[in-house]
Amino acid sequence: MRAVKLAPSLLSADFAAIADAIAACERGGADELHLDSMDGRFVPNFTWGMKIVRDLRRLTRLPFDCHLMIVEPERYVDAFRDAGANRITFHYEATPHQHRLLRHLRKSGVGAGIAINPGTPASMLVDLAEELDRVLVMSVNPGFGGQSFIARALVKVREVRALLEARNPACEIEVDGGIDGENIERAIEAGADVLVAGNSVFASDDPAENIRALRRRIDARHASRA
Ligand code: DX5
Ligand code: ZN
């Protein structure tokens, strides 16, 4: 049975105290850090680019999963890799050349992930399945932290799991958006391997303890999935 990972999203952290936020993720036992890059075009919000990723790289050895919510991701993936990304997850909807870009990512030595918006069906991944290390199922519309979980995403996780079962069983499924102590177990039950959590980690006082609390939920559900 695969380990289920917890990936705090720094989007909801205080950007003026980002080193403290990362230290709390380490103390809490995060498996990786989820870094959301937004370009104000693919989504109606801005966050950080390669310079910040490079600077953050000096603060931690936790793997960086760079979730690119940007148009034409092919123009920037090498720069994100050079800045220290361990995995790059771009959006299916952001480029017509998903297959080429997935192959390029693997060839360049970073994990290859693709994200699908709530309005994009799992079936769009049929011809990409073999090229993938990770599928990110969005459980909110991308662009902002703190939105409510879209329950339909659980159906999609099951559909993606079924599709991968035959073609690429090693591929991980990540769920991103609105994950909290209430729905995290349902996401795992549906087949999620990686849970992103922004608001539920950073919106209240003790992020390290919030991570531990989510971890306990994961471990409880994971034991019963065995
Ligand atoms: C939304 C981002 C998410 C976000 C999740 O566009 O992709 O990673 O930070 O935050 P919560 O957990 O607050 O929904
Ligand atoms: Zn994200």
Image: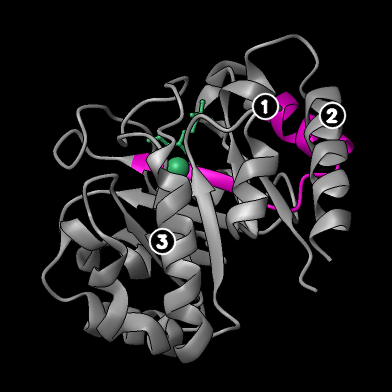
The span shown in magenta is 19-37
Q: Secondary structure at mark 1?
A: loop
Residue 82 appearing in the image? no
Residue corresponding to mark 2: 213
**Disc 2 and disc 1: Cα gap in Å?**
11 Å
Q: Earlier in the sequence, mark 3 or mark 2?
A: 3
Residue 192 falls in which quadrant of the image? Answer: bottom right
Q: Secondary structure at mark 3?
A: strand
Question: Position of 18 compared to 103: left or right?
Answer: right
Q: Is residue 16 magenta?
A: no
Q: Residue at x 57, y 84 (%)?
A: 169
Residue corresponding to mark 1: 182
The label nearer to you, 3 versus 2, is 2
Q: Which mark is residue 89?
A: 3
Residue 25 falls in which quadrant of the image? Answer: top right
* Residue type at the position of mark 2: Ala
Q: Residue at x 34, y 87 (%)?
A: 103
Beta carbon at label 3 within 8 Å of ligand 2: yes
Residue 101 appearing in the image? yes
Residue 205 at x, y percent in the picture: 76, 9
* Residue type at the position of mark 1: Glu
The label nearer to you, 2 versus 1, is 1
Tag 3 and tag 2, C-beta contact below 8 Å: no
**Disc 3 and disc 1: Cα gap in Å?**
26 Å
Closer to the camera in the image, 101 or 193:
193
Q: What is the quadrant of the N terminus in the image?
A: bottom right
